[in-house]
Image (spheres, rainbow, N blue to C red):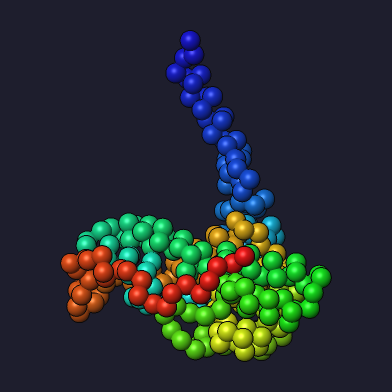
């Protein structure tokens, strides 16, 4: 049987070598993506750069960081009609801890209409479309989609009609920065007039967001798009929404009825095939 000192020694040795694919504690130093957190990251990286270090496997460029910071700022969107934000506000109005409010908003953000679900739908739609382009012209493909009632992920908005102000602002900034567009963004620009003419739908912010993440230099996979969407597209909006019990003059959210959170917008526009 091991003595107490031997057990402590074994624990200390294993603790100093516990790592994951991202890093860990190695020989007393904190490693993150191959860099020393204390001596290399602290004071030299912003939070956005640290997240992109994980996602890209390298230090991001100034332009890449600026784009991600723009994503974060443009998604401070505390609209109480959005279900995830409304749910967080309900939790806050009920007196739940802030961590609980964040938790329920993150859970609801996995729905198919917005947030993570919408981003993944848009990713699959663009990838499928790009694959079909190898055999047929884009006009023919979109015409077929229109006839078959395919869901145009990344187009239209369930709560607000007309152009997406965030899309307009972001594309304007990209042109101002002379941003190098990749194949997914170029594909998006090609199909916008076709879908607008055939379906009357404008591109929403999610379409350009996902197209940029799929293109070089990001080339994000599903996991990185999910993490980016949760953090970038949702989290900033939760902060003001979850303060309702302290900041709001009114408390219109309680009592909560099922009818308060039921979707009352337009019916689903068809399914992807």
Q: Nearer the viewer, residue 94 or 162?
A: 162
Q: At which x and y percent is residue 240?
A: 35, 73
Q: Residue at x 62, y 58 (%)?
A: 222
Q: Residue at x 79, y 74 (%)?
A: 136
Q: Nearer the viewer, residue 169 or 206?
A: 206
Q: Quadrant of residue 46?
A: bottom right
Residue 254 visible in the current orientation: yes
* Figure label count: 0
Q: At which x and y percent is residue 67?
A: 61, 76
Q: Quadrant of residue 189?
A: bottom right
Q: For the C terminus, give its image quadrant.
A: bottom right
Q: Residue at x 49, y 13 (%)?
A: 2
Residue 179 visible in the current orientation: no
On screen, residue 42 above or below 191? above
On screen, residue 210 above or below 16? below
Q: Residue furthest right?
A: 135
Q: Residue furthest front?
A: 147
Instruction: Classify residue 157 as left or right of residue 101.
Output: right
């Amino acid at each position: 049987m091991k003595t107490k000192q031997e057990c402590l020694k074994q624990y200390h040795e294993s603790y100093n070598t516990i790592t994951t694919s991202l890093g860990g504690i190695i020989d007393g130093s904190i490693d993150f993506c191959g860099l020393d957190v204390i001596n290399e990251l602290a004071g030299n990286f912003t939070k956005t750069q640290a997240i992109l270090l994980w996602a890209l496997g390298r230090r991001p460029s100034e332009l890449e960081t600026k784009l991600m910071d723009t994503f974060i700022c443009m998604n401070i969107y505390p609209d109480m009609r959005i279900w995830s934000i409304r749910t967080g506000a309900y939790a806050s109005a009920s007196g739940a801890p802030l961590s609980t409010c964040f938790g329920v908003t993150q859970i609801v953000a996995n729905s198919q209409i917005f947030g993570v679900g919408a981003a993944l739908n848009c990713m699959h739609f663009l990838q499928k479309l790009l694959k079909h382009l190898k055999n047929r012209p884009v006009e023919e493909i979109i015409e077929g989609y229109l006839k078959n009632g395919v869901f145009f992920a990344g187009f239209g908005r369930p709560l607000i009609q007309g152009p997406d102000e965030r899309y307009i602002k972001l594309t304007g900034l990209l042109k101002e920065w002379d941003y190098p567009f990749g194949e997914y963004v170029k594909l998006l620009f090609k199909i916008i007039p076709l879908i607008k003419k055939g379906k009357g739908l404008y591109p929403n912010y999610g379409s350009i967001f996902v197209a940029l993440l799929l293109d070089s230099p990001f080339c994000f996979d599903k996991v990185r798009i999910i993490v980016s969407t949760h953090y970038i597209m949702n989290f900033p909006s939760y902060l003001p929404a979850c303060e309702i019990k302290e900041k709001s003059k009114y408390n219109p959210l309680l009592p909560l009825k099922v009818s308060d959170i039921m979707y009352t917008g337009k019916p689903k526009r068809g399914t992807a095939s």
